[in-house]
Image: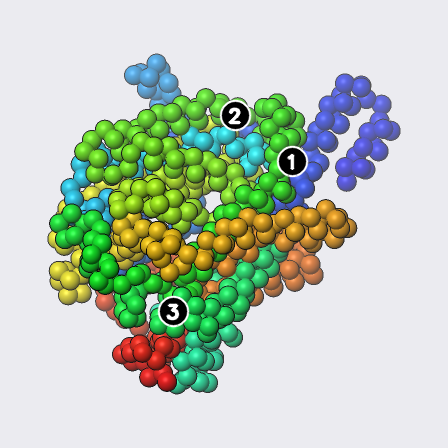
């Protein structure tokens, strides 16, 4: 069409200046984004006159952020925590925003105390950009404040008082510190058209379906109609796996065929085994670990499945049946810690009862710490993932990164979205620098300026920041191109555990400053890319993200502090009344990690005093693994698929067990390959219109049904029908049995 316009312009007699102007418009309208999924999903139209930070934006955004922050933190302490995502508020806000646009008076309010500054109560129809900014508020509110775990275990497990000001500063600095260095990477992770952040396309499609007016062709659904049908269908169906027929969450046929065989159930169990032939009929299971497969590029799905296959059917079986690391003494698939007798590891036996520090004599008389073979390879593959991330990005992206660094701030490279966004004022770099410097000072003051309850010295904070900074760019590139984000939790625990052993609170504080700061930086950049696609002024995005983070932090901290002082014996099931929900399952895991890494220490796990010293080879394996792929891609450039072999992604998915279950992966993979390989190739037009809309509809349907069941039925003690299908497991009870002949576990048959 653009070619036809250009030909017609040649035949018209118009002034050269006007011709140049029209040619400029045509050039800007050419969608030169190199990523086809983005070209098919993100519009290049923009209305810069559309109001953004309106009265409606602030009122609905702040209320959404506070509501989600309070609800999610309140229920995180309970035995069955509920999490409400931003998509629920995103849909609920639309009618409220339109109602405010219809009901509020068109009136200008002046604020004399602010130099006569004024704003309009009703600047016109509720628009898409307002909706995006409100959703950013809600998205910030739906996330957790990780440092609250540190406060909780200090008060409830270690019985240590912590001053409110220390706790507030800890939560606040760990949430905002990463924002300070996010600005350094905008050029690489936001402005670059090759960093396309696949998950944001689901949001873009949903906003378009909710706001754009379409002329529906005969016999064809509009995006909004398709979304409503998908949401309603998923909502209606979700009552079965969520309440009436929970066994649909894991169908493990092998266990049904061999109900008395431990080995068969270890192979076939989808939840506590290797998941051979296991499948689920529940969208919640599909998205439970990796999110919606409809938002993943095909090569990411294939690499992920290969990594899962490598772990489940090569590494774990070989190590288990060869009895490496005494694996047969423990379940093949468990996230727990064990002693040498196959019992859960009793950490209280190796601690001094008053000071909670390590008791070497008690440890020598008790047992080393063991984990299941699946959990052991989680650590090994995690080591390989981080090492491979550095070398992969250096080899495949190093040249382009260096070129962008040399080009300076006035780099003119980019695509149509970059050109459109140049109309808006960018966020000055000194804003980010000011945040980083001020929050760094507050972080050191938090750990060193009071009674040092956090145990972490100033050099620990600086080292944690250095770790986060080093990994932000490589992990950001992986996230922005594959939709998967490796974490730093293992490597941060390992580093501080070696350097500063015997201090559990220092260990978790270091992990929070290093790991969560990087996560927050990438989260910030992801939202900036969404704003980039939706043409939101960058300064408006920055302001909403900062204010939303402050509101989320204070609301969640206030909720947690109130519950910690209001509920007697919270997080202590042995002293809670029978049936009390305040058991804090997430904090128990966090506490155990503080003992294993901070008290026992990595030296007794992965060092010369530990059982798993051989896993350190994974660092070397991971670091060199991208080299042959890179060499082959250079040697045979005609084979484009070689570059798509993503070693960090393969190791990352090999490290996902036992947190992720086999049934999660295989169901996720089947759905992902069907839509993003088969449908994408055969029905490109349908995929372009409906794929991401379908993803949002399914997520929303599951979310609304989960909320309904929890608040209407489960909160009132109304349980589902009692029958064979009401078991939330996969009917593979023997899968968690050890197979060592000397280990006896109740409910497990004897092994000879």
Lower position in the chain sequence, tag 2 or tag 3: 3
List the single residue furthest toward the top. 115
The answer to whether the residues at label 2 and label 1 have Cβ atoms under 8 Å apart is no
Identify which residue is drawn at 35% across, 51% down: 602
Residue 616's x, y, as percent? 46, 53
Residue 368's x, y, as percent? 30, 61
Q: Residues within 10 Å of mark 2 (few under 14, many from 20)?
A: few
Identify which residue is drawn at 47% across, 27% down: 539
Per the image, the residue denoted by label 3 is 326
Seen from the viewer's position, the closer of residues 499 and 426 is: 499
Mark 1 or mark 3, whichever is nearer to me: 3
The answer, for residue 676, to whether it is visible in the render is yes
User: The C terminus is located in which quarter?
Assistant: bottom left
The answer to whether the residues at label 2 and label 3 have Cβ atoms under 8 Å apart is no
- Height in image: 580 above or below 183? below
Residue 451 shown left or right of residue 512 in the figure: left
Residue 315's x, y, as percent? 50, 65
Identify which residue is drawn at 32% across, 26% down: 441
């Amino acid at each position: 069409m653009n070619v036809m316009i250009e030909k017609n312009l040649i035949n018209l007699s118009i002034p050269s200046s006007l011709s140049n102007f029209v040619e400029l418009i045509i050039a800007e309208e050419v969608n030169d984004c190199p990523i086809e999924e983005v070209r098919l999903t993100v519009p290049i139209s923009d209305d810069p006159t559309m109001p953004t930070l309106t009265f409606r934006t602030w009122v609905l955004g702040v209320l959404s952020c506070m509501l989600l922050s309070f609800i999610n933190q309140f229920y995180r302490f309970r035995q069955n925590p509920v999490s409400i995502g931003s998509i629920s508020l995103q849909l609920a806000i639309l009618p409220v925003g339109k109602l405010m646009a219809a009901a509020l008076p068109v009136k200008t309010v002046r604020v004399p105390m602010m130099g006569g500054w004024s704003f309009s109560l009703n600047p016109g129809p509720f628009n898409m950009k307002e909706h995006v900014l409100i959703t950013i508020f809600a998205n910030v509110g739906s996330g957790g404040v990780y440092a609250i775990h540190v406060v909780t275990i200090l008060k409830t497990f270690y019985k240590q008082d912590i001053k409110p000001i220390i706790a507030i500063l800890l939560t606040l600095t760990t949430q905002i510190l990463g924002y300070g260095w996010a600005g350094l990477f905008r050029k690489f992770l936001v402005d670059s058209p090759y960093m396309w952040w696949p998950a944001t396309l689901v949001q873009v499609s949903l906003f378009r379906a909710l706001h754009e007016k379409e002329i529906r062709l005969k016999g064809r659904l509009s995006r909004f109609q398709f979304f409503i049908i998908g949401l309603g269908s998923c909502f209606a169906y979700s009552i079965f796996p969520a309440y009436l027929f929970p066994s649909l969450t894991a169908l493990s046929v092998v266990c049904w065929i061999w109900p008395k065989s431990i080995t068969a159930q270890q192979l076939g169990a989808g939840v506590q085994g290797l998941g051979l032939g296991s499948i689920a009929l529940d969208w919640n299971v599909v998205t439970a670990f990796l999110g919606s497969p409809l938002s993943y590029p095909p090569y990411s799905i294939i690499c992920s499945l290969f990594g899962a296959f490598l772990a489940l059917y090569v590494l774990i079986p070989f190590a288990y049946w060869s009895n490496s690391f005494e694996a047969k003494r423990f379940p093949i698939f468990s996230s727990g810690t064990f002693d040498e007798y196959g019992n859960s590891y009793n950490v209280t036996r190796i601690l001094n009862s008053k000071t909670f520090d390590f008791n070497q004599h008690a440890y020598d008389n008790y047992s080393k710490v063991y984990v299941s073979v699946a959990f052991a390879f989680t650590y090994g593959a995690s080591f390989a993932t981080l090492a491979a991330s550095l070398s992969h990005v250096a080899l495949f992206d190093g040249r382009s990164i260096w070129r962008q660094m040399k080009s300076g701030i006035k780099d003119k490279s980019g695509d149509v979205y970059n050109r459109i966004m140049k109309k808006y004022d960018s966020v000055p770099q000194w804003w980010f620098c000011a945040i980083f410097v001020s929050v760094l000072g507050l972080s050191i003051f938090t750990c060193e300026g009071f009674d040092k309850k956090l145990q972490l010295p100033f050099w620990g904070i600086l080292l944690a920041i250095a770790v986060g900074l080093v990994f932000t760019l490589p992990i950001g590139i992986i996230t922005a191109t594959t939709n998967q984000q490796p974490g730093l939790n293992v490597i941060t625990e390992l580093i501080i555990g070696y350097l500063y052993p015997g201090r559990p609170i220092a260990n978790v504080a270091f992990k929070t400053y290093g790991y969560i700061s990087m996560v927050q930086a990438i989260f910030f950049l992801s939202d900036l890319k969404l704003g980039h696609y939706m043409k939101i002024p960058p300064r408006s995005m920055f302001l909403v993200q900062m204010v939303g983070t402050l509101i989320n932090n204070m609301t969640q901290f206030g909720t947690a502090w109130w519950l910690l002082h209001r509920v007697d014996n919270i997080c202590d099931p042995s002293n809670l009344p029978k049936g009390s929900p305040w058991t804090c399952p997430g904090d128990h895991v966090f506490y155990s990690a503080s003992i294993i890494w901070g008290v026992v220490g990595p030296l007794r796990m992965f060092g010369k005093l530990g059982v798993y010293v051989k896993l350190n080879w994974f660092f070397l394996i991971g670091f060199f693994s991208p080299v042959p792929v890179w060499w082959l891609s250079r040697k045979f450039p005609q084979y484009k698929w070689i570059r798509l072999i993503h070693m960090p992604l393969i190791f990352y998915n090999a490290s996902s067990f036992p947190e992720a279950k086999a049934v999660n992966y295989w169901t996720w993979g089947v759905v992902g390959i069907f839509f993003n390989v088969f449908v994408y190739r055969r029905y490109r037009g349908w995929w372009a219109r409906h794929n991401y809309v379908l993803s949002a509809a399914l997520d929303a349907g599951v979310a609304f049904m989960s909320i309904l069941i929890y608040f209407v039925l489960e909160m009132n003690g109304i349980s589902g029908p009692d029958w064979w299908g009401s078991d939330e497991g996969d009917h593979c009870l023997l899968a968690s049995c050890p197979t060592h002949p000397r280990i006896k576990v109740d409910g497990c048959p004897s092994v000879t």
